[in-house]
Image (spheres, coloured by chain):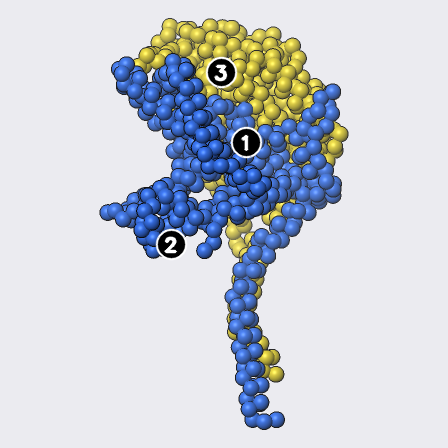
Amino acid sequence: MRINKALLTFLKGLLPFIGLALLVAFGIYLSATAKPSSSKVKNIRWVVDPHPIRPTTIALFEKNNPGIHVINDPDAASQRLLTQLAGNVPPDIMTIYSLDQLNKFAKTGLLLDLTPYVKKYKIPVDELWPQLKSYVYYKGKVVGIPENGGNMYMFYNKKLFRQAGVPYPKEGWTWDDYIDAAKKLTVYKVVNGRKMPVQKGLYVDNIPCIFIWKYGGSFFSPDGKKCLMDSKECKEGIRYWYDLRMKYHVLPTGEETSSMASMGGYGGAFLLFAQSKAAMVITGRYMVPQFRVQKGLEWDVAPYPRGKYTAAPFLSKCYAIPKACKNKETAIKFLCNILSRENQKLISDFADGLPSRNSPEVIKDYLYNPEYPNETKNQLFIDELKFGRDIEWSPYISGADQAAITNIELDKMWLEGQSPDDACNNIARKINEVIRRNLANPNFLK
Amino acid sequence: MSKTNIQKKSSKRDLSSNAFRETMAAYGFLLPNFLGFAIFTAIPVVVSLFMAFTYWNIFSKPIWIGLDNFRSLLWFRHDGGHLVPNDPFFWQYLYNTVFLMMGIPLGMAGSLILALMLNQKIKGVVFFRTVYFLPSVSAGVALLILWKYIFNSEVGLLNQCIRSAGAVIYASKPLAMLFTIFCAAVFGLIIIGIIASVLSFLSWICEKLKFYWPEWLYRILVILSSAAVYIIIAAYGRSFFVTMSNFMGDPPNWLGMVSWAKPSLMFMGFWGSIGGFNAILYLAALQGVPRSMYEAAEIDGASGWKKFWSVTWPMISPTTFYIMIMGVIAGMQSGFMQAKIMTGGGPVGSTTTLEYYLYKTAFENFNMGYASAISWFIFIVVLMLTLITWKLGGQLVSYE
């Protein structure tokens, strides 16, 4: 029986370790499942990008709601957010950045239906700009609350315009007017025998719809089952874009952008405009905080280029509450605060887009900010909203696949000499192939 | 029972008891590690295998779809009269991954050369060892951002250096000629090196098939091909000169051109792998080679090269083999950070690897089942490559 004794001695030795391990595991379990109600301060977690306005928003909410502490979980990239959702420890408020993702989340029943709470807490969803509807509703249910929104607008550098003797843009300017100005505002210098771009007339991000809408084209058919990039209108748009960059050289190429722009920092390549290396830029009002702090930058905003089919990309994001959220009521309070006049004024003052509420008092606060008396065209941001259009997406192909195919073909166009028509044909063919595959295999659409 | 027998039995019991206790103690110490492995590795691996046969968007319950994910990943289908891959990206990204893996042997060769240099008895060798190991302890992301600056086409350090050197060299005709001849000679040597390696490989294959090449045939083939290479280079001398001067005057946009993006990343990987753990492993292996073997070789009149080829190389072959296997495994799983930070997977998807694709599938497309299928495909390829390396490389390794 000595073996058993030996085993017993060994197990006795092992007991403290097992006990310790159990204690640690129990501690982890307790802290993971701890109910915040046991403490006087209630914590809620907000997963959102690390925009400089966040601490102020939180401070405002905490001031209005003593006893609630908002944990800012910044830059919770998709893998962290998904892991939290899958692990059933969701954040209390999550941020959704695209219509594609909003529909994906809503379709799977992940988001809390806010409709009953809208009535209960009198959340002013009726006062939101009509353009924001797609960020609020999914199949008639309220699923998201947008804080801000707005089109992409034409910003211009007044100083560069004056130096080049080009009149400032005015209402009614067409694309051709803007391009004429851009040609005059594009400057090169010769360094060691090399022609180097010093200043470009225009900077536009890689958003093909800006150009295809100009000709009345659409990326997808209305039912989303067909990519229409091989249509005449889309080809015209992409050809126009191609010419701006490769024929008229008013838009920087990728190589020129990376050479001219300082790397890093909030705003990325749009720093070309902030650093007076691009005379005009098509971007959103959310870039204004960046422009404000740039020394020597005299900027203003102009109407979006007009034409037969004037349509500017409309961008927003929304906050949603996961169904599995453990602090629903507190999270709802936070969303109410998002649409409060005080918070909406914060958005106005900070210039983080346009405040999402279209109510007289919010508009009044928005239109004039005494801290920035030179910003006299705030009404223009509102007036242009009628041209706003959501970035197109299809429920039959994921946004990531669509972007990958489009970027690869456009890269071939910019870098390998593929013609714009061929790029359009290839984008349409490849996206339609994926759509057909997905339609044939419904698992891809679930 | 005699006293002696009782004593014998008792001592046997003691022995078995001691052995048992020791075994149990060993298991006891292994237990925490085993638990960690089971919970954080084995179970997720098994779950991911299950997931590979399901459609799972992380929010709802997985749906069993059998081999559909693998079919979508690997198969082709007829669409509009054309044969198209079910997955429009997979084959390109697999090609990118394999292409980038071609940098592994170069990195190994670099590590070995560095280790040989660091194995010399010179003053300040510890300082040099530290300096060359630094890339391994530096933060990966910071290094990648630094390299992004270096590769910038206009303001990057690399192109500035190339342009400055070009301006000096091509300002004087004799210098330009000398430089062109030098570059042509180096270029030729690289080509000859590749030809010699291919011939050696062929010779080795023939040897396995019991078909022996005579040594003179091998030498003649190398000499003839070397001559042919230099004749061709001389014939295209003018074009070579123009190409070189164009290159030096207007160096490429390394990360922005399809033809240069992958080689640029390979070069960066080469730099990173030279001074890393591989060099440390090689250094340790070199220091383990018995001095007596070199002395014996010296007595036999072996030259430096002969000593390396006949003593050092066989003695460090297990290390080479280990580094090669680990390199193959790591190579199939690489490319995420470079793509995420430096290139975004472009241009034209030329720097998107399977690992980056896996990430995008899981966390941008929310398709965990498909991502699991990709990961299991990577596992199978790694396994196959490792077995092939084991089979082929194992025959070249000598264990003392």
Residue type of the residue flagged with mark 3:
Met
In the image, residue A127 above or below residue A32: above
- Label 2 with label 1: CB-CB less than 8 Å: no
Mark 2 and mark 1: Cα distance apart in space = 38 Å
Subunit under mark 2 = B
- Packing grade of label 1 (10 A; few <14, some 14-19, many >=20) is some
Indicate the secondary structure of the residue bearing disc 3: strand
Residue of label 2: B288
Residue A257 seen from this side: no
Vertical side of B324 occupied by A258: above or below: above
Camera-near label (1 vs 3) is 1
Q: Secondary structure at mark 2?
A: loop
Q: Which residue is mark 3?
A: A154
The amino acid type of the residue labelled 1 equals Asn
Quadrant in the picture for residue A444: top right
Left or right side of A103 for A47 = left
Question: Splitting the image into 4 quarters, where does residue A104 fall?
Answer: top right
Q: Which circle marks residue B96 in the picture?
A: 1
In the rendered image of this protein, which colour is used for chain A? yellow
Subunit bearing disc 1: B
Image quadrant where one finds the N terminus of chain A: bottom right
Q: Quadrant of residue B134?
A: top left
The hue in which chain B appears in the rendered picture of the protein: blue
